[in-house]
Amino acid sequence: MDTLSPVALIDDDKDLRRATAQTLELAGFSVSAYDGAKAALADLPADFAGPVVTDIRMPEIDGLQFFATLKGMDADLPVILMTGHGDIPMAVQAIQDGAYDFIAKPFAADRLVQSVRRASEKRRLVLENRMLRRAAENAQETLPLIGQTPVMENLRNILRHIADTDVDVLVAGETGSGKEVVAQILHQWSRRRKGNFVALNCGALPETVIESELFGHEAGAFTGAQKRRTGRIEHASGGTLFLDEIESMPVATQVKMLRVLEMREITPLGTNEVRPVDLRVVAAAKIDLGDPDVRGDFREDLYYRLNVVTISIPPLRERRDDIPLLFSHFAARAAERFRRDVPQLSENVRRHLAAHAWPGNVRELSHYAERVVLGVEGGGTATVPQLATGGTLPERLERYEAEIIRDALSANDGDVRRTIEALGIPRKTFYDKLQRHGINRGGYASRK
């Protein structure tokens, strides 16, 4: 507990006010004492950071009138009523009306201290939630890439400087870190924003399909090509083409993509016609394409052609101070979508936000916020111990394994390939485990 946590104390009895203030100060509180409600109302700020402790029997404005006034100013301000024996029925009614607690006189010092301590913690949580919500709203209005840490400020500054330069960009970052968000920002902040933003995940399409998707084809170009199709590259002309997981692009397609970047022209399948394109390419990779030992079959010349500007997105674990703000933003967004109330940031959720490694980065955090809003999450770090109790050892391990698989699916939007990579198991084993645990992969697909 912060030794300077504030408390407002109102009591017209000078000796009792002095003794109560001393009790609270010895317990580590900073006490602002007043001899009446009128003086307190004139002095207390609207966003007072602590609870209010007030007597009921006072001249001019009694404690119940004072409580009603405070409630009108801030319904979440904890008010603790000190009552004589005859005032208890009134105090009970005040509790029903929203007062935090009542303490009957004479009271033990510890009874007051414990009540004030709990009320102070509640007030701290309320004010912190308000601050995070305001910050999330401001960030949403002004900057799509949310974060207040220096590394995120630097990232936004870089994006501002290069957005309108029209250079191709390589974005590096772990799964779920926000690579497509960066690509969309570059598009929106550039003169190309009136053109199309076209995204293609190179890892989601088989080699037999990706070339047609990128370059398009004429009717009859191959079996099943019944009509002409405009490819993603041509559709992005005048705008931005975003190639996600470009490290998964087949080698043969890489050769053709290199020519597109150098000549800014395409030749669709089934025709010899060369068509010029005006586009900016933003490519994203979750591996270090600059490391020959890591990039594998990815062409070095294509890497250097894309690497005009490289932007690295830090993983969530390297900007942990942004996690509460991001959670608040995602929770507010989820509450609006699911028509639920925005939840308060409880201690369990707070501990989970602080302790979890977030391997799925911002995407995983977004899904966690959705589950908290829906009421199916919120136990935070207590999740795994609960799974590990009850039943035989094999039964516990089964439940634990199922939860790990669900977490991996959630962190990867239900994408099989990424989930298998995260779990480090063969594809057949993965599907066997889904069936054994009764897990529906479709329920984890992205809802964005």
Image (tube, rainbow, N blue to C red):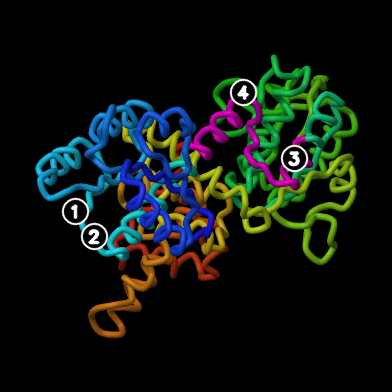
Disc 4 vs disc 2: which is toward the camera?
Answer: 2
What residue is disc 2 on?
Answer: 107
Q: Residue at x 86, y 35 (%)?
A: 259
On screen, residue 110 above or below 227? below
Q: Residue at x 28, y 34 (%)?
A: 67
Q: Which residues are magenta?
A: 130-156
Q: Amino acid at mark 4?
A: Arg
Disc 3 vs disc 1: which is toward the camera?
Answer: 1
Label whose residue precedes the other's in the sequence (3 or 1): 1
Disc number at residue 153? 3
Give the distance between the C-alpha atoms of the residues marked 4 and 2, in whole angstroms. 81 Å
Give the distance between the C-alpha atoms of the residues marked 3 and 4, in whole angstroms. 42 Å
What residue is disc 1 on?
Answer: 104
Label whose residue precedes the other's in the sequence (2 or 3): 2
Disc 3 crowd rating (10 Å Cα; few below 14, some 14-19, many 20+) is few
Label whose residue precedes the other's in the sequence (4 or 2): 2
Disc 2 vs disc 3: which is toward the camera?
Answer: 2
Q: Residue at x 38, y 31 (%)?
A: 74
What residue is disc 4 on?
Answer: 229
Q: Residue furthest bottom?
A: 393
Label whose residue precedes the other's in the sequence (3 or 4): 3
Contact (Cβ within 8 Å) of mark 2 with mark 1: yes
Disc 1 crowd rating (10 Å Cα; few below 14, some 14-19, many 20+) is some
Disc 3 vs disc 4: which is toward the camera?
Answer: 3
- Label 3 SS: helix
